[in-house]
Amino acid sequence: MPSGELSEDQDQVRPTGAEGSPPSLWSNPAYRIFLGVQTLSALGDSISYVALPLLVLHSTGSVLQMGLVTGLTGVASILTGLVAGVVADRFDRRRLLMLADGARCLLYLLIPLAWISSTPIWLIYTVVPIAGCFSMLFQVTYVTVVPAIVQPDQITKANGHMYATYAVASVAGPALAGFVASSAGPAAAIGIDSATFAVSALGVLLVKFNGRPQPTSPAQRGNISQEFLAGAKFLWAHPVLRPLTLLLSLITFLIYGLTDLVIYLVKHELDHPDTTVGYVLTAGTVGSFIASAAVARVRKRLGFGVTWISAFSLAGLSVAGIGLSGSVPVIAVLMTITLMCTGIAGICSMSLRQEVTPSHLLGRVTSSFWTIHTALGPIGAAITTAAAAGAGVTTVCLVMGVVVLAVALTGTLTGIARPHAVEPVNPVDSVDRPTGEAA
């Protein structure tokens, strides 16, 4: 991931605003195009998230096969995430973005073409996991190119905008997929999905990246395991990223299954219909929009450490409140606050990694961070939902919220709380070398 620092030549060609002030993000054509590309790609992901299970259900009538397809996609994405950072650091990132979107366009196009004359369910089992691999490659690579498009002090704001596009896509994509599937069939919805990826791939051609890193030579690379470990070693060596990764792993373990708990609470314990569940979750999405709009201003005023610790502390209190409340409107408000806080903390975390990580390591650091901090999530979801089935959602949410608050406050005892601990560091000089290379 680019570090956000510019060479002298690059700094000279960057436009400036009036009286030498930096230009706004919206005056940057590369950023505007890239944001549009991101929106289309996110919309495509959201459409396929709904249209593919619907197609499987229409073709087989089996909820088991729906789950198998979803599970295969998840496994493919996780496995790809282990090496996506290495790929993003080795090869031209513009071409990787185009490859990821172009491949998904062609793969998803195969499905509606095949469904014209038959229903080869085996094709879905083949296409969808492969598309999941390219989706993960795109996600890792896009994180690495943001600092090559915007100026260093605009990274957090840019990430906030992109977070908002994902929130929009998470609402608009399923709605569009459902409308098209009901009127023309789920295969047609997948065809539209394919078209969004085609436009996105072409849009990348128009984006000018500044400060593209030079690929490392074969002699500097080492093997795949060494390259992947370089990202993990950088995280461990950094005084902020190390505690951040550890604490976020614990928080992810705790709140990964929160949506399932809220659905169970509203539908079964409070005895409300599915439409009410939808309203509560939609209200939560509003928190994502608030986070994207406020994060740059909040971080600039409070600093990274105070923002991150405060956001997760408030999220913990909100989760505890969800357990204590028996009112659906109150639960909706608390979900909004929770998603707002986790969104602010997440955007700040991503921005920090982009700011302090050398460009040639950013892909591997991103992959390592995502792999490490999400690894315990599914286990946590299984444990919390099982606990809720026995002890009730009220008890579980209360305990979960208190522990999240405690974990967040632990950050005050680590490098996260240090106001000047976010400067670029040099552990990469040692961790990125293959074993045995001289320092």
Image: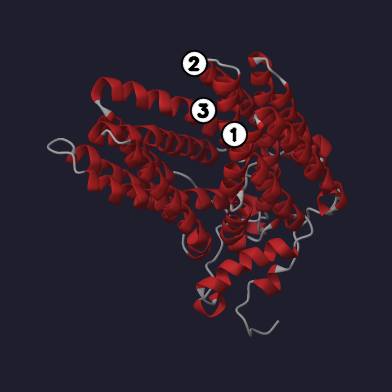
Checking the image for residue 389, the label placed there is: 1
Confirm or deny contact between disc 3 and disc 2 (CB under 8 A).
no
Task: Reply above or below: 64 against 181.
Answer: below
Quarter containing the N terminus: bottom right
Between circles 3 and 2, the one closer to the viewer is: 2
Quarter of image, res 314:
top right
Which is more N-terminal, label 2 or label 1?
2
292 relative position to 83: left or right: right
CA distance for labels 1 and 2 = 22 Å
* N-term-proximal mark, 3 vs 2: 3
SS label for mark 2: helix
Q: Can you see residue 146?
A: no
The x, y position of residue 404, in whole percent, is: 75, 40
Which residue is tagged 2? 275
The one nearer the camera, 233 or 97, is 233
Structure colour scheme: secondary structure
Image quadrant in which you'd find residue 206: top left
Determine whether the residue tagged by mark 1 lies in a helix, strand or loop: helix
Which residue is pictured at 83% across the width and 40% down the height? 306
Q: Is residue 292 above or below residue 69?
A: above
In this rendering, would 310 be left or right of 254?
right
What is the distance, in whole Å, between disc 1 and disc 3 at their CAs? 33 Å
Q: Which one is earlier in the sequence, the residue at label 1 or at label 3?
A: 3
Taking the spot 26% from the left edge, 20% from the top edge, the residue there is 183
Badge count: 3
Label 3 to label 2, Cα distance in Å? 20 Å
Kindly identify which residue carries mark 3: 168
In-image side of 436 versus 63 (left or right): right
